[in-house]
Image (cartoon, rainbow, N blue to C red):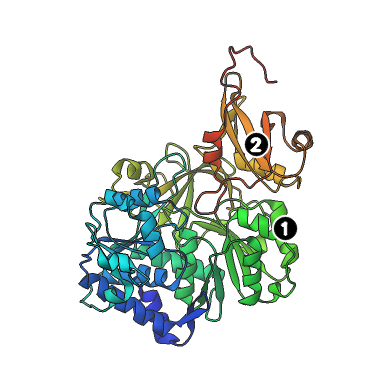
């Protein structure tokens, strides 16, 4: 059977192992045959309800079986699914729905009542599908400009689905925008299937695996837990956790074999007492969304002596880019590895030529995972998705239509053996005393002291230094103790000008990462009022 299209990852696994569990959620398990049937039924139902080819259907739910059916059913129908992070507020949700002209919305009754007023800003919305039964109020009152129907009523109708090929767009994933409006990254069936097969291959996913989905399914790495599982015939356990200890309990109770998470969650998990039995069935843990502190990695490996660590790097615009094999972790734990299968990663100078070994440059991704651009934003698309320079390795001169690659905006270096190391985002690099400093490097050094459980570093304007380094963290240590540790671990130009400690967790964006941009925009710059270049740091 073909598996060129996203939903065919399910149908192929259903044909091979129909009774294998595909999804487990809140005490309910659905096997591959049942999931394939549910997806096909939803696809025909939304076409009967009026969803045209390439029209957008948004899903605003927590992690549950209806979410998965809606996503893959929309893909099978020939529509475009827009997964919306369930932590977003009504105004943020309405912005996304209006930005990509959503035609249909699948949500719950409680969430719908919270959204109702904001939805008036979504003129293209035609139908709202509630996974619950309609209550008396919704039945008794005239409908809004959109029609509200129940899940079962939607599924009562059926029509032939639209024709789909692998270059058709199938998803718009919105990146969280802390200092601006979020951008919708458009991905095709080919992008998502290539990503699923690539990641599943190096993680060695297989039937019998049980993957715990703790990241938001609106996040590319979170959604990848579904696609890699379905590509390999594994089981995904959906989890809406409240506390890190809930994750630990689920790993144990569900006999999880694969876990992917972001550094803030791993930092919290590493501090817990782990049941020794988990390492006997947890085959791997994978990190994404930022570099994991070395101390956290060491703690996790002490808890999980038989479990393989995979350190990964990715960007929504290309789904996944690099990984470090577990057997390389001991000798290069700070590396993000090499290109994943079926992708090529280049390190380029501003003129498009390749950087020498250990020379910093921009990470550029070429291959089948390169997305289709940003929804309805040609200017931002042109900034990030650009023709591959003729001087770059792999470029083919003479092409009438040049190959388009993703220019990540991240600065990396490649060592003499070809391994990549993340330095920082170009727009987050701190320029101080004539040096370019990576906030990640500062964070890593302070994490290694063990004084702070979490922290973020960023730069603010300073009349003498250009930018002053600010560190905000959470922990029980005194500021003076942290400063002394910084003086021992970091050179003079990397010393924080301000260290601010809190007794509550730092803000996170909807994908669970520490929101460095939010911290920097809220920080009141004490150096803004310095009168002259002769002023000195206090």
What crowding class fits label 2: few (fewer than 14 Cα within 10 Å), some (14-19), or many (20 or more)? many
Q: Which disc number belongs to residue 271?
A: 1
* Mark 2 lies on residue: 471
Q: Position of residue 513 (x, y in %)?
A: 55, 50
Residue 222 or 148: which is nearer the viewer? 148
Indicate the quadrant containing the N terminus: top left, top right, bottom left or bottom right: bottom left
Tell me: 430 left or right of 35. Answer: right
Tell me: 371 left or right of 263. Answer: left
- Mark closer to the chain start, 2 or 1: 1
Which residue is found at the position 56% from the left and 77% from the top?
209
Tell me: 345 left or right of 459. Answer: left
Residue 346 or 370: which is nearer the viewer? 370
Marks 2/1 in contact by CB < 8 Å: the verdict is no
Indicate the quadrant containing the C terminus: top left, top right, bottom left or bottom right: top right
Q: Label 2 vs label 1: CA separation?
A: 22 Å
What crowding class fits label 1: few (fewer than 14 Cα within 10 Å), some (14-19), or many (20 or more)? some
Q: Secondary structure at mark 2?
A: strand
Q: Is residue 431 above or below residue 99?
A: above
Tell me: 342 left or right of 493. Answer: left
Whether residue 330 is visible here, answered yes or no, is: no
Q: Secondary structure at mark 1?
A: loop
Residue 29 or 116: which is nearer the viewer? 116
Which residue is found at the position 53% from the left and 65% from the top?
240
Q: Position of residue 122 (x, y in %)?
A: 27, 51
Q: Position of residue 427 (x, y in %)?
A: 49, 37
């Amino acid at each position: 059977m073909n598996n060129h299209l996203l939903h065919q990852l399910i149908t192929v696994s259903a044909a091979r192992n129909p009774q294998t569990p595909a999804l487990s959620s809140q005490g309910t398990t659905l096997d591959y045959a049942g999931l394939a049937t549910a997806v096909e039924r939803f696809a025909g139902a939304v076409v009967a309800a009026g969803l045209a080819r390439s029209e957008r259907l948004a899903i605003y739910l927590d992690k549950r079986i209806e979410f998965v059916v809606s996503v893959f059913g929309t893909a099978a129908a020939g529509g475009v699914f827009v997964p919306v992070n369930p932590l977003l507020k009504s105004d943020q949700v309405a912005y996304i729905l209006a930005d990509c002209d959503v035609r249909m919305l699948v949500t719950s009754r409680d969430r719908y009542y919270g959204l109702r007023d904001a939805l008036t800003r979504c003129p293209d919305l035609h139908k709202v599908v509630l996974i619950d039964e309609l209550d008396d109020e919704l039945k008794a009152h005239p409908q809004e400009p959109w029609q509200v129907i129940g899940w079962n009523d939607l599924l009562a109708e059926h029509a032939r689905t639209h024709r789909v090929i692998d270059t058709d767009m199938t998803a718009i994933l919105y990146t969280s925008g802390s200092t601006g409006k979020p951008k919708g990254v458009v991905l095709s069936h080919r992008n998502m299937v290539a990503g699923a097969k690539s990641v599943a291959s190096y993680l060695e996913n297989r039937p019998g695996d049980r993957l715990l989905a703790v990241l938001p399914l609106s996040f590319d790495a979170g959604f990848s837990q579904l696609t890699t599982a379905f590509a390999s015939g594994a089981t995904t356990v959906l989890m809406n956790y409240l506390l890190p200890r809930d994750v630990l309990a689920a790993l144990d109770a569900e006999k999880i074999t694969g876990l992917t998470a972001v550094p803030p969650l791993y930092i919290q998990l590493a501090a817990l007492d782990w049941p020794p039995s988990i390492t006997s069935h947890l085959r791997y843990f994978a990190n994404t969304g930022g570099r994991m502190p070395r101390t956290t990695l060491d703690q996790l490996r002490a808890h999980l002596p038989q479990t393989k660590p995979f350190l990964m790097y990715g960007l929504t615009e290309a789904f996944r880019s690099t990984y470090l094999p577990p057997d390389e972790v001991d000798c290069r734990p700070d590396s993000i590895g090499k290109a994943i299968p079926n992708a090529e990663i280049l390190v380029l100078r501003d003129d498009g030529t390749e950087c020498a070994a250990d020379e910093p440059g921009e990470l550029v991704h070429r291959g089948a995972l390169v997305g289709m651009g940003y929804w309805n934003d040609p200017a931002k698309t042109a900034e990030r998705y650009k023709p591959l320079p003729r001087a770059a390795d792999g470029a083919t001169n003479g092409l009438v239509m040049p190959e388009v690659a993703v220019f990540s905006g991240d600065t990396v270096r490649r060592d003499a053996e070809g391994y990549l190391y993340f330095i920082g985002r170009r727009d987050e690099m701190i320029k101080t005393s004539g040096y370019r400093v990576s906030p990640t490097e500062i964070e890593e050094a302070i994490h290694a002291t063990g004084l702070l459980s979490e922290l973020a570093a960023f730069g603010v304007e300073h009349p003498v230094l250009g930018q002053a380094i600010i560190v905000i963290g959470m922990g029980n240590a005194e500021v003076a103790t942290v400063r002394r540790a910084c003086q021992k671990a970091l050179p003079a130009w990397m010393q924080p000008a301000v260290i601010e400690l809190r007794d509550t967790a730092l803000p996170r964006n909807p994908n669970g990462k520490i929101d460095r941009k939010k911290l920097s925009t809220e920080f009141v710059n004490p150096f803004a009022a310095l009168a002259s270049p002769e002023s000195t740091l206090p």
